[in-house]
Each structure stands twice: as structure tokens, then as C-alpha cells.
Amino acid sequence: MTDRSFPPSLPARILVVDDDPGQRSLLQTFLTGQGFAVTVAGSGAGALATLLRQPVALIISDVRMPGMSGLEMLRQIRSSQPTLPILLVTAFANIREAVGAIRDGALNYLSKPIDLDELLATVRQAMGLMAPAGPSNEPDLVLPKEIVFRSPLMKAVFHDAALVAPSDSRVLITGESGVGKEVVADMIHSWSKRPQGPLVKINCAAIPDNLIESELFGHEKGSFTGANQQRIGRFEEAIDGTIFLDEIGEMSPGLQAKLLRITQDGCFRRVGSNRDLITNARILTATNRELEQDIEAGRFREDLFYRLNVLEINIPPLRERPEDLLPLANHFLIGFTRDQARLSSAAANCLAAYPWPGNVRELRNAMERAALVSRGGIVLPEHLPNRVQAAAKSPSPALNSATNQTDPKRLEVIERDAILQALRKHDFNRTATARSLAISRRSLTYKLQRMREQGFPVDSKSDLANTP
């Protein structure tokens, strides 16, 4: 296959096939932004009808769809168009299906939630396209002044948020407590096509189980003791806007079933009512839990997880993006003291030595304390919380002289080999790979992107086998 410049003079047309409107919207928005022409179909039969009317260069299809499955569609297309590239995507990937799909002629087999970098690399490879050498089609990030970062990891987070914002796709925002999941949800809403609509926020962990159903869906007068009047629920409030469900992993199994129905057809009922209501609210969710583990333990529905997780945006912890630490600390300090206080170098060293398990929220609280204790002057180590002061006094293995004398190129090779080995061990499951390496999925994605740009193929088992 011969490479050519990207994008071609006539955009290559891609057919996206998925019964989930959110997934179709995401892929159409993303691929159109990359310079492709995109046609969508909601079923296998619809895709076959589209092919009769319009030639395409590539098909991206879900596997499990009502009626004709992606695998059945693949077999029918292969009988008439044996060379048309077809990329299958599914939330329920398993080895047997993957082997069967490749045997039947699928180009590749990717798992949901889709990694957009991996998807784009696969599409470009299939169509013989090189990555653009000039300005990219990435969205310009216009961020409010209260959002402060310097790290490429956070740039990638907001890049993903900007990419998915114009679609109506559901987004799952993951990360440890205090990393800023609500901030990302705010930006997705403000960059969306519905910024004038309401942004309704619910913390699922803060509302008792016996009240949260009424809070979300509303209730009719007399539906339970104390229901003295009809109440409109938060999903009704969010019509033409966005609803953000924080700590979604704390939701009870019974309520998960009702939320699943909303993700499927937008229908719900107020408590005590027998009449269906419809909402077009876009659903954003967030969690600090490992929902895959909750699924295995039977605490969270697998089908709901994949309905909510059309795209996952994982926010790395503060310890994985040290470039952001001091800019954030100074930003908070300026806000609390109206630009009067300053960090001493000794205090800055204390901040850098502490691991910040509470992430940005903990840093903000520490800076608020420092601003009060220092009375708006120079912040010294003694103005910081005791736990932060203690971290600077403890020797850190990461800062010993032996590590500092290590060749950075050698460290890069060690890291790259560890990542490749972990990818093999976990059969290219990026969530499991990131967990085994004790880093966030976002951090792993960034590292894989850098390795890909350096010429190390990391997107398939066959490619990895040929890695030098």
C-alpha cells in the first residue's frame, strides 16, 4: 500500500455503523474533524443499503446490533467486496469473536470505549494515509483563566473534551478524587452545541438511596409519604442541556436499571406515575472507582457501563503531572491573597516532595491554609500542612543521586520495554496495562502516542511482534 499526503484532494468516505446514536455522533464528529467524509447507518441492513447507493473507502462497525450483527454484515459484504477494509468495534470483545472476525476478513478489532488515537492510527494505516505534516485539524482550546495546566497530559485531556463536546455522545470522566472531573464536565458543556441549555449536576453519593430516584426523575403528588406536591426531576430540568452524574459508581442496582432505559430511548417515569416522559438531556458521568472491577463483582451493570462510556476521559492524578504543581499552587495563592503572597523556594520544594493523594483539591486547601497563616506574605514551609512539611524531610528514592545520574535515554528504553511487555501480558487491554504499570490510562495513552510517533507500532499484536 502506497502512502500519500493527508488529507487527499477528495476526502475519503467512511461508513460508520452503530445502533447507538451517541457512538455514531462521536465517530462522525471526530472523523469529519480529521478531514474524512462520513456517512452513518444505524443497522447492518442500513449499511448494506447505503453501500448500494454510495461507494465508501472504509467501514467502521459495531459488532452487537439488533437484527443483523456486525459479523453477519461483514460476511455479506465480503461476498461482493472482498477488499473493502472493515474495522469492527465492540464493547464486548473476547478472543473467540476477535479471531472469528479477523478470519472472516475484518481489518482489525477494537474495544469500546474507543481510544481515538488508536482509532485514527488504524484508519490512516488502512487507507494508506500519512499523518498530516502541517497544521492539524485539532480544535483550538480556549480555556477560562481559572483552568491552569502546563503538562501535555492535561492538554490531551482537554483536547479529548473539545473533540467530543460538539457531539451528543455520553462521556464517562474517570480519575481519582480531587483531580478535576467536574471542571472537565463544565468545559464539555460549554463547548457543546447546547451551552445555553442548563447544566444540571448531581452527586450520586451525597443523596440517600430512598431519595435519589425522586431527585433524578421527580415524583407525583401522593406517591409516597411526604410527597405533598408534584416535583420535577433533574432529568426534566436538564432538557435541551446536560446532566452530570458524579460518583455514578455509588448508584444502586435498581436505579442503574432505570438509568439504562434513559440511555437507550430517553424515557423515564416520575415516581408514582404510569406515564412515560422523554428527555433529550446529554448525559455526562464521573467516577473515582474502577467500574470494571465493580462489574466483575456484580456491583455495576455491564450494559450500563458501555452505554455511559461511549468515550472515556481519564484525568491523571497530580503526581503524574508534576509540571502542573507549582503553576496551580501559585494560581490558588494569588486567588486567596489577591496577588500579595509568594511561594518561597523552600516551600516550593516541600510541595514538590509531597505525593498529593487528594490531588488538586488537596493542593487548593493547602494553599488556602498557607495564605491565611502567612497573612499574605512569603509562604514558608512552616505555613504548609504538617504532612507536606514531613514529606520534604523524608528521603525519596526518586530523588537519590544514583537515579539522577542515570542516563535519561536508558530510562526511556526501560520504560518503553516495560510498556510493551505489559501490553503483551494483558492482550492489549489498555486499562489493565495501565493498572499493572501503576499509572493512569491517560498517562499510558500519552506514552503510547509518543512511542507511535517514534515509529514503535503499539496498536496490534501483529505489529508488536515485529517491534525491533
Image (cartoon, rainbow, N blue to C red):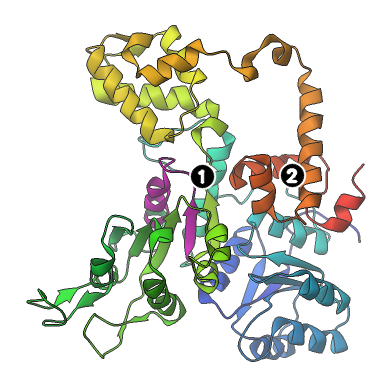
Residue 85 position within the rendered picture, expressed as x and y whole percent measured from the top left: 81, 72
Few, some or many C-alpha atoms within 10 Å of disc 2 (few <14, some 14-19, many ≥20)?
few
- Residue pictured at 88% horizontal, 81% vertical: 82
Residue 354 position within the rendered picture, expressed as x and y whole percent measured from the top left: 48, 22
Q: Is residue 32 above or below residue 182?
A: below
45 and 296: which is toward the camera: 296
- Specify whether residue 3 is in view: no
- Residue pictured at 80% horizontal, 89% vertical: 76
Q: Residue furthest front?
A: 297
305 and 77: which is toward the camera: 305
Give residue 273's quadrant in the image. bottom left
398 and 217: which is toward the camera: 398
- Specify whether residue 145 is in view: yes
Q: Earlier in the sequence, mark 2 or mark 1?
A: 2
Q: Quadrant of the C terminus?
A: top right
Q: Which residue is mark 1?
A: 315
Q: Quadrant of the N terminus?
A: bottom right
- Residue pictured at 26% horizontal, 14% vertical: 340
Q: Which residues are magenta?
A: 170-189
Q: Which residue is mark 2?
A: 133
**Number of marks in picture:** 2
Q: Is residue 353 above or below residue 135?
A: above
The reply, left or right, for residue 28 in relation to residue 325 is right
Few, some or many C-alpha atoms within 10 Å of disc 1 (few <14, some 14-19, many ≥20)?
many
The Cα–Cα distance between marks 2 and 1, rounded to whole angstroms, is: 28 Å
Q: Is residue 238 above or below residue 53?
A: above
Inspect the magenta stretch and tell me whether residue 314 lies in it: no
